[in-house]
Amino acid sequence: MKHVWAVVFTLISMFFASGCRHHDSMGAKVFVVESVYHATHCLSNSIEAHALWVDSLAELQRLWENRYRSRVGGSPIAIPEVDFNTQGLLWIHMGQQSTGGYALALADPICRVKNEIASVSVNWISPASDAMVTQVITSPCILLKLPKGPFHSIQVIDQDGRVRLSEKLN
Amino acid sequence: MKTDVTNMWPSVALIVFSVMLVIACNSGGGDGVPANDDQPGVEPFIVSGTITPAGISAVDNDVNDPNAPFLANDTFDQAQQLYFPVILAGYVNLAGRGETGRSFAIGDPHDFYRITLSAGDSIVLYIARPNDTDMDLYLYRADDFTLVDASTGTGANVTLSAPNDGEFIVDVGIFSEAPTATGASSYNLIIGTAADLSDLTSYRLSHEFIAGEIVVRFTDDEVISSRALFSDDKTRGGGMDRVGGETSREMLLSFGTGEQTRSVFEALDLKPPSMVRALSTSISEAIQHKIDTLKVIKALNRRFDIKKAAPNFIRQPFIEPNDKFFGLQWHYNLIHLPEAWEMITGNDEVVVAVVDTGVLTKHPDLGARLTSDGYDFISDAGIEGNEPQEERGGIDPNPDDPGDQSAGGSSFHGTHVAGTIAADTDNAIGVAGVGWDAVRIMPLRSLGVGGGTSYDIIQAVRYAAGLPNDSGTIPANPADIINLSLGGGGHSTVEQDLYQTISQSGVIVVAAAGNEANNQKSYPAAYDGVISVSAVDYSSNLAYYSNFGDTIDIAAPGGDTSADLNADGYPDGVLSTTGDDISGTVEMGYRFSQGTSMAAPHVAGVSALMKAIWPEMAYSQFDYLLRNGLITKDLGTPGKDEAFGYGLIDAQKAILAARGGTIPTSLSVSPSAISFGTVLSTATLRLAKSGVVDAALSVRSTSDDSDWLTVFPDRVDGDGLGTYTVEVDRTGLADGIYRGNIKFVSSSNTVDVPISLLVSRNDRAGNAGYHYVLLLDPPTFNVKAQVEATFDAGVYHFSFSDVPDGEYLLYAGSDLDNDFVVGDLGNALGAYLSIDQPIVLGVDQDVVGLDFRTEFKINLFDSESFNHVSEYLPIQRNQKKRLKE
């Protein structure tokens, strides 16, 4: 599965060439967005779903440290590489869930910008209603990297076209 | 204090008028005796009688009421003699605080009492006005005034217990170092007859904690926290050093003795720390430092910017494995696991099946603990996750967890569960498992991406239990215990039948109750034959997410990762083994998680330890022990309740119960001990056969070891089981404490029943304080007449001589605090016929010989607002002088 995504990403990257900013057939500006991290147990100060725009290394380091506060032992997980001069990170938290079986995944590597609002598409995954699931509290999250662009807010849209979250940028 | 009376009038009126006609027609009613039947209708009339306090009641000798008898009890030498057991009412105040009265000007901050106690006797202080008066208890030896214990708190009650037999001085005092709003309150002191009310708001000198160290949690309000006196920059300025933590979570503060203590007291507006040392003749600097620490904690707990301050307790593990992160596994101390490890650490013979996401078989803290016959029962290729290509498309004998996320970020849930049950223990790395070396894990994989199906779980459960299944094989050594940290879907009769079959075969099945914080049944936990486990947090409270309801059997630590109450710098989740596959390869490690998933394996692990020490233990025996409270610490409502079932799993109790191994045929005696105190002379013991096997058992002999003690059968069957009467005879015994023993020898075991007896030549006559007697107008409760009772030989006498023809309510009570009100908390109150049933007296002739009881109104509910209007009565000022100092 990872190989498939790698091929897709490579093709898209080639298509959009450098800068990754183009227009689609509807006239919207488009960017390439990349998933750099995701997990099912992400500590957060909020138990509600939320998104957070991260535009500095210091902020990323603070969040990363908090993310791994529940982990001891093992090798440290490398912090994602980001050029904060040209890129930022969108940290999407699904919010606290009562069981396993929940997850977030990038649905479309293309981010569209219209009326200064960027839209990223994710799969907002819940377990089937009749599934047997683990009885652990989970807090799925995903970290998306995208170029800084001409947008003042970002929408998170799920697989059904529903706007799940909206994050205003400073 | 004043209550809204408008809503009470209908009920009061109903009670009053429902009995009014009867009483009026009976000319006095109840025990009243018409004295001049031949002259009805002649005014004025006499209303007289007596009031009786409880025999064990006593009153402080120096209350604020200037009409009450006075004898100072302000020092050790002046200590007022009390006799066990006792319920006492008293009053303390700081100078210039409280109501005007006898002690207003000079103050009466301490009352000293002398009493003989037995080890374990409880001393409970109930404060009438806890919201604005902070009081503490101190306990000294009576011979040399050595301080033996102290209890501080900020709630409505404070508790101590006698550490040994002997004579003690009890000091009831206002926390006078702090500027309190009122600094005066009535109180009740109950010695010997109340349960130990130890709670989280009360700390004792006898607790083991580090003097000068305080764990503080600031309020969550960041704005307030930023202004806190003890925020980062100001901590040192306030006299305390910050040892660890930060304002956003728990912080460890410390202060030394001498000048630094004085600096801290000054910063908290406390008076210099000298009172206790001045009182006690032999108090060390170390003890003084501990007392000062408790006072600082109390002062901090009264600050607006402090959410909680507590001592830095010293926890002493009985046996401590050398696993690197064992110190972070708080959840094991919570269930007394180290104490259990003192008795059993295992021998590899018990098998616990973990039906889950599989287990990371190469985890360095788990690999050696796994059986070789695990299996992967995931039959749906769509949820197999990152399974190797050659194993895809169906079940296979590889239970390794390949991850349940297609691109990393997997949960490795089964690894976490397995680690709690049986992580390699005392191997110098990682974490400890509940089972130490007693347990091996049979890893079974039924959950993949997004969960799994009940069919695959059924196959795994059948395999674990040694029943035919889709693998076509059964393990050579089926599991003794099956852990199911999973749930979902609805009820299935197929599954119910399976779990009943398995439990009847002896296998113990443990399951997580679910995390929806509701009482909906979650399966498989709610099936008959399955042990359903709810979750508690670090404070043994039901975890905020845990399900509850009538199917909950037992509780265990599930954690709360939003808190760090133990201030170890990590979330208060359950720490166990896990992995992280975000990088593309699996990094083995450890993680704090929360959920009933984490609670269930604690129970599975403890039951495995029990099985190791009692191999024959089957589900039915485990269930018997559970239902009889032999493996749990009861929490919540006594007995079984919807939050905790039969209580929090207690590994020490469980191992002790299992070590007996004789449950089917043992003799049990209830109660297990008898304390006769100073009054009782007979009691009943009930002998019964305990166990689930109907084996023969008979009582072979009964004996006692003291001349003053006798035991004889009352109603017993042919085996000697039934009730026995125990009698004590105080004739010829000198004052003192006596201890004896009754021994029952049965064909199975011997049971000793300790007996204690107190002898006191003091003829107890209760005293509930100076009493005011009131005749009230029934509809309005207005006082129509008032007299003051005379007290003689434990009885109050009263007589109204000029009572007009009419209807009256009759009340009486004390006014220790001199607030011109009887019936408020801490004071005594009585009514004719009784407080619960006040009745209207129809007076059209003399009514004499009335008798009713008076008793203290104790603040049992930590509230000052439950007074009923009819129990809160003003005293007429023209009949009682308020002293102006």
Image (spheres, coloured by chain):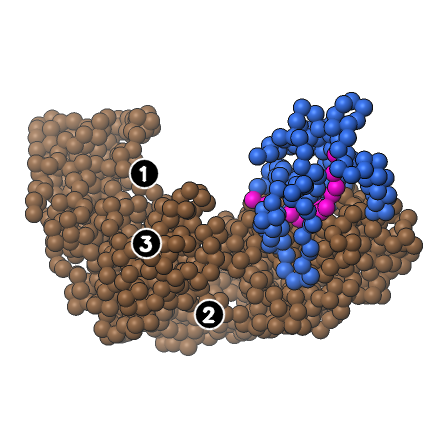
Chain colours: A blue, B brown
Which residue type carries mark 1? Answer: Ser
Q: Residue at x 82, y 58 (%)?
A: B399
Residue depth check, mark 1 versus mark 2: number of the one nearer the observer? 1
In three-dimensional space, the C-alpha distance between marks 3 and 2, rounded to whole angstroms, equals: 44 Å
Q: Which region is colored magenta?
A: A31-45
Q: Are marks 3 and 2 on the same chain?
A: yes
Work out whether residue B611 or residue B281 is closer to the camera in this orientation and state it: B281
Q: Position of residue A126 (x, y in %)?
A: 73, 38
User: Circle 2 is placed at which residue position?
Assistant: B753
As drawn, the label of residue B865 is 1
Q: Is residue A131 left or right of residue B801?
A: right
Q: Position of residue B862 (x, y in %)?
A: 35, 46
Q: Position of residue B822 (x, y in %)?
A: 20, 41
Looking at the rendered structure, the secondary structure element under dot 1 is loop
Q: Are marks 1 and 2 in contact (CB under 8 Å)?
A: no
Q: Are marks 3 and 2 in contact (CB under 8 Å)?
A: no
Looking at the rendered structure, the secondary structure element under dot 3 is helix
Residue depth check, mark 3 versus mark 2: number of the one nearer the observer? 3
As drawn, the label of residue B299 is 3
